[in-house]
Amino acid sequence: MSSLVGGWGAIAIVVALVLIPIARQGADDLAVLMIFATETWAEMPPPMRPLFERELLDNYEIKLEPTDTELPHFHSPLPFLFFLENALQRRLDYPSHIMQSDNGETWYWFNIPTDRQIVQVGIPRRRIGAHPPLAVLLVLLAGTVVSLTTSVLLARRLNRPLVQLSAATGQISRGGYLEPLPETGPEEIASLVRSFNRMSGEITALLA
């Protein structure tokens, strides 16, 4: 039971200190790129925009589609999209809700305003990166490894005084001289070793 609790504790630490900060930073970086690309596109002469759109799609997997038609809002369970939505709204001071389209491939869209119009900026599902089930599986695996390693090290630390105590008992039974054992470890084991050292000293004195 303690190993299971330790495993879930390790998972919670990894999620809180590693996965969430990485996802939040990645969403912030992508929000900056999407806003910068939209502003750059808006300042371009219209004949140059198609080439810029192709370059943006090929190099960054980002689509720009000026449109007056808004897609239905989409509530995604993916934490990354939630972070991205918040990052865009924080920088734009504009309600940039998640929208979704699926024409053979899932795309997520966000409205980004320019001086002249609203531009829908889209990213594909694959652009998000690691899939949440895989990330959760890796976290579970890491938590299990950490928990098992901790349990083994703790068991060895607790068993070492008992192993020394067992060897010392055999040495006394053979009539050999025994140096006092180190009285370390948990209080119960340290108390047991203390009593053994006292008994060993009395036996040595009687034999002498």
Image (cartoon, rainbow, N blue to C red):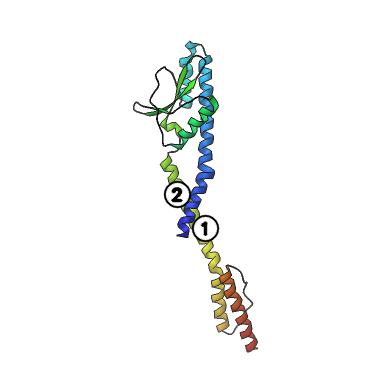
Q: Relative to the observer, which residue lies in front, 55 or 17? A: 17
Q: Which residue is mark 2?
A: 140
Does dot 2 land on a helix, a strand or a loop? Answer: helix
Q: Residue at x 51, y 40 (%)?
A: 20
Q: Quadrant of residue 174?
A: bottom right
Q: Which disc is residue 4 wearing?
A: none
> The C terminus lies in which quarter of the figure?
bottom right
Q: Is 152 situated above or below 38?
A: below
| Dot 1 amino acid type | Thr
Measure the alpha-carbon separation of dots 2 and 1.
Answer: 15 Å
> The N terminus lies in which quarter of the figure?
bottom left
How many residues crowd mark 1 within 10 Å: few (<14), some (14–19), many (20+)? some
Q: Is residue 114 in view from this perspective?
A: yes
Q: Residue at x 36, y 29 (%)?
A: 105
Residue 149 x, y percent position in the rendering: 50, 57
Q: Looking at the image, do the residues carrying marks 2 and 1 touch, with CB atoms under 8 Å apart? A: no
Q: Which residue is mark 1?
A: 150
How many residues crowd mark 2 within 10 Å: few (<14), some (14–19), many (20+)? some
| Dot 2 amino acid type | Leu
Q: Earlier in the sequence, mark 2 or mark 1?
A: 2
Residue 96 x, y percent position in the rendering: 47, 26
Q: Is residue 177 in view from this perspective?
A: no
Q: Left or right of 180: which side holds 130?
A: left
Q: Residue at x 46, y 37 (%)?
A: 79
Residue 88 x, y percent position in the rendering: 51, 28
